Structure formats: C-alpha cells, structure tokens
Image (cartoon, rainbow, N blue to C red):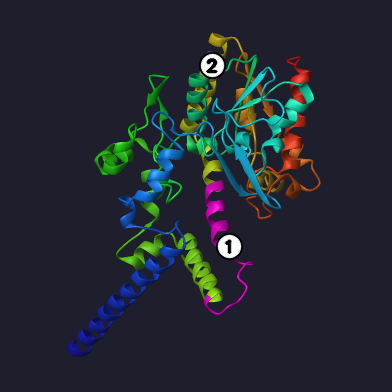
C-alpha cells in the first residue's frame, strides 16, 4: 500500500514537472508574439540600443519624457491610406494655410488633440481655424497624461500666447496621471518614463521625470526602487499579471485574462503556419487587453484619490490661466470604446464632469453626449474595431463643430 502511494506521489510530481516545463515553453512562445504577456524578465527589460537612439533623437524630452520635436514629420496608417503629420519650428503641428495667421486659440493634450491618423489639414484644430480665420495652434502629444499636458503648457505658453487655451484629453488620462513608467501599464513601452503629480498636504507635488538625462536610460535599473514606489500600477497591475514559476498557479491566478490570451495567440499562430486567413481573429488578443484597460479607467473614475488628483491638476490649469489671462477650456475627447460602453450601460465619467463644471472660471466641453447621438459611430473613428483608433476626418469635423458651438454660446469667439 505504501509502495503504491509512493509511486502515485512520484507520478504526480513527475507530471507536475512535465507540465511546468511545457507551460514555461508555451509562455515564452506566446510572449514573443504578444508583448502583453509578461514574465519575470519584464521587471528588468533589456532596452533596445537601436530603438533608444532613434527615440532620443526623435522624441526624448528630459522634462516631459517625450515630445514632438520641431521640424520633424512622420507618416502612419489612416482610415483609407497613409497619412502624414509634420511639426513646425515652434513644436506645434503644422496647420496648413494658417501658419502665418494670428492665433486666438492654442491647444494642449494627448493624441486626440494632436489628431493622429489624419493629415495636417484634417485635424479638429484645422477645421476650427477654417471657421474663425485664425491659426489654432496644436501642441498635443500622443500618450500624454493631463499632467504632461499642463507641464508643457506652462513651458510653451509664454512663447505662444493666445486668448483661449484648450486642454483636450481622453478619459483614459485619469490612468496616465498615475504612471511614471508607462511600461508598468502599457507593457513594452520601455522608453516611456514621465513626470507625475501626487497630492501632499492637499497640494500638488511634482515628481520629476526620473530619466531626466538620456544617459540614465543605460542605467535605469539604478532607479527601479523609486520607480516601483512612485508608479501606481506596479503593485496594482504589473506585478499581478507577471506569469512566472510555478506557472500553473501563476496562470490560474488570473485565468480569464491568461487562458484567453494564450488560446487566441496560439490559434492565430496555427492559422499562420497552415496558411489560413487569420485577419478575422487577429484583433481578439488585443480586444481582451483593451477591455481590461477600459475596466481600469471605469474603476479609477470611482476611486476617490484618482479623481481628486485629476481635479487638482485641472485646478492648477485654471490657476495658470488666471496668471496668464487666458480663458481655460477643458474638453473630454472619448475613445470609441468609451462611447460604446456608455451607450450600453452608463456615462462613467459624467459625475467627474459635473464636478469640473463647479470650478470657477473653467469652461468645460464634453462632446460625449452629442457624439452618442451620431447614427454611425464607426464613421467618427479611423479603425473599425471596438477600440476605434483615433478620430477620423469626419470625427474631427464633428468635434470642431461641437467646440465651436460651445465657444459661440459662451461668447468666447
């Protein structure tokens, strides 16, 4: 009997060892194909020297983390064809036919203010320029939090003064405000170090960009202890999603995420190997990630500390407007999955908007309600999946129209 039990135990141990070896091989295999599968090695990723040199020359900024540098240009996929953006000598996006005109309005924010995936003459700033006959300057930068947008505004405004300053960001900015290393939320974004604000004694305190000298990229591990401490998502998300030994337990700690990702990544890989058309299912792994990200921002808009931090940053924006005598306009620019969720369930950041509207001297424009009335939301965005990418030419025209109506109603233009 004892002998039989020992054989059974030994068999179980051998089985577990074999399974662990298989799972390790499986995880390393899917990790190569999908950056959102992370392992222990991602705590100290090796930075690409070639990629880093390109990033430093094209986008690195010691204060902000990254920025669109003057006199640069780039092309990327649009709705139907390649689109091109260019940056003028001031560091603003080129506004075709209006570069020599006076400026009444300047804009700061993220990629929905920069207007990625459309041409220079298809941004909402350009469409506003066409209506008011003035150069609406666009200082938006992709993937910025509202924290970075405010810091850039304070840096640029004295050289580019306007009567009105629009601060336009996606609702996901509530999450971006909590990062100091984008990699801890957007796995693989290893060059994305940034400043952030925290609240200390009911006031904003700036944590400066930890990699404020390009040489520090090559020794970033020296700053890991502080990065881990200052970044909200290291403990809350990144650490929990690492898949490591014992792999069985690690995978089953988050089965809905891990098993679905592994399934779809392997299925896509098998389709490729067998020459099958995988386009229909190619988006499925990323769809899982985007839904997790959406759930995070919904959660954060119900988190007191995250909301207060966001609100404090907006209040600082208003304080800056009083110092510099401009009208502050805050605009929420929803992503497609924001709209789809709100249409099906509820307006998850409406309460926050209501709170912002109580801030004295601040003008708030939420285009969400009007965009929801559009019969075909797909037309507003470049990509046809549920994420949607960025606003299309049609979407930017609609946003410009809504902002103009509000500005006229407020007698600001």
Label 2: how many Cα within 10 Å (few below 14, some 14–19, many 20+): few
Q: Is residue 385 magenta?
A: no
**Residue 236 visible in image:** no
Task: Judge left or right: residue 96 versus residue 60.
Answer: right
Q: Is residue 365 left or right of residue 151?
A: right
Residue found at x 34% / y 76%: 19
Residue at which label 2 appears: 159
Q: Which mark is residue 72?
A: none
> In the rendered image, which residue does mark 1 sit on?
284
Residue ID at (56%, 52%): 290
Looking at marks 2 and 1 on the same chain, the residue that comes earlier in the sequence is marked by 2
What is the quadrant of residue 89 in the picture? top right
Residue at x-position 29% and y-position 38%: 216
> Rounded to the nearest whole Å, what is the CA distance between mark 2 and mark 1?
46 Å
The secondary structure type at the circle numbered 1 is helix
Along the line of sight, the residue nearer the viewer: 362 or 209: 209
Q: Nearer the viewer, residue 357 or 196?
A: 196
Residue numbers of the magenta segment = 273-294
Q: Where does residue 244 sit, x and y in percent of width and height?
A: 32, 61
Task: Give whichever of 284, 35 is nearer the camera.
Answer: 35
Which residue sits at x=26%, y=80%? Answer: 14
Q: Position of residue 53 (x, y in %)?
A: 38, 44
Q: Can you say whether 207 is above or below 60 in the image? A: above
Label 2 secondary element: helix
Above or below residue 286? Residue 174 is above
Q: Nearer the viewer, mark 2 or mark 1?
A: 2
Residue 289 among those drawn in magenta = yes
């Amino acid at each position: 009997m004892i002998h039989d039990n020992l054989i059974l135990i030994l068999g179980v141990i051998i089985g577990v060892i074999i399974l662990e070896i298989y799972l390790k091989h499986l995880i390393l295999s899917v990790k190569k194909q999908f950056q959102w599968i992370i392992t222990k090695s991602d705590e100290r990723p090796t930075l690409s020297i070639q990629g880093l040199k390109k990033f430093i020359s094209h986008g690195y900024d010691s204060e902000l983390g990254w920025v669109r540098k003057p006199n640069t240009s780039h092309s990327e996929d649009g709705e139907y064809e390649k689109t091109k953006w260019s940056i003028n000598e001031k560091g603003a996006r080129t506004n075709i036919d209006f570069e020599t005109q006076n400026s009444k309005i300047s804009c700061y924010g993220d990629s929905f203010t920069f207007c990625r995936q459309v041409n220079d003459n298809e941004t909402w700033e350009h469409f506003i320029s066409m209506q008011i006959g003035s150069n609406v300057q666009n200082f938006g930068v992709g993937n910025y939090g509202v924290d970075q947008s405010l810091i850039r505004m304070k840096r640029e405004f004295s050289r580019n003064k306007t009567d009105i300053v629009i601060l336009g960001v996606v609702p996901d900015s509530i999450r971006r405000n909590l990062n100091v290393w984008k990699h801890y939320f957007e796995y693989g974004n290893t060059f994305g170090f940034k400043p952030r604000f925290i609240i200390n004694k009911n006031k904003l305190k700036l944590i400066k960009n930890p990699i404020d000298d390009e040489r520090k990229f090559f020794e970033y591990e020296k700053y890991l202890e502080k990065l881990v401490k200052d970044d909200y998502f290291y403990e809350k998300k990144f650490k929990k999603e690492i898949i490591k030994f014992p792999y069985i337990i690690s995978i089953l700690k988050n089965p809905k995420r891990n098993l679905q990702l592994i399934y779809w990544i392997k299925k896509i890989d098998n389709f490729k190997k067998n020459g099958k058309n995988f386009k229909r299912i190619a988006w499925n792994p990323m769809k899982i990630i985007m839904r997790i990200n959406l759930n995070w921002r919904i959660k954060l808009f119900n988190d007191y500390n995250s909301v207060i931090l966001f609100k404090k940053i907006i209040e600082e924006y208003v304080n800056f407007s009083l110092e510099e005598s401009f009208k502050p306009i805050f605009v929420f620019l929803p992503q497609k999955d924001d709209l789809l969720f709100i249409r099906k369930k509820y307006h998850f950041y409406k309460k926050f908007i209501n709170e912002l509207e109580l801030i004295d001297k601040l003008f708030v424009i939420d285009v969400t309600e009007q965009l929801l009335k559009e019969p075909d939301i797909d037309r507003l965005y470049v990509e046809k999946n549920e994420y949607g990418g960025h606003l299309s030419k049609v979407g930017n025209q609609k946003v410009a129209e809504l902002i103009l109506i509000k500005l006229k109603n407020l007698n600001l233009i």
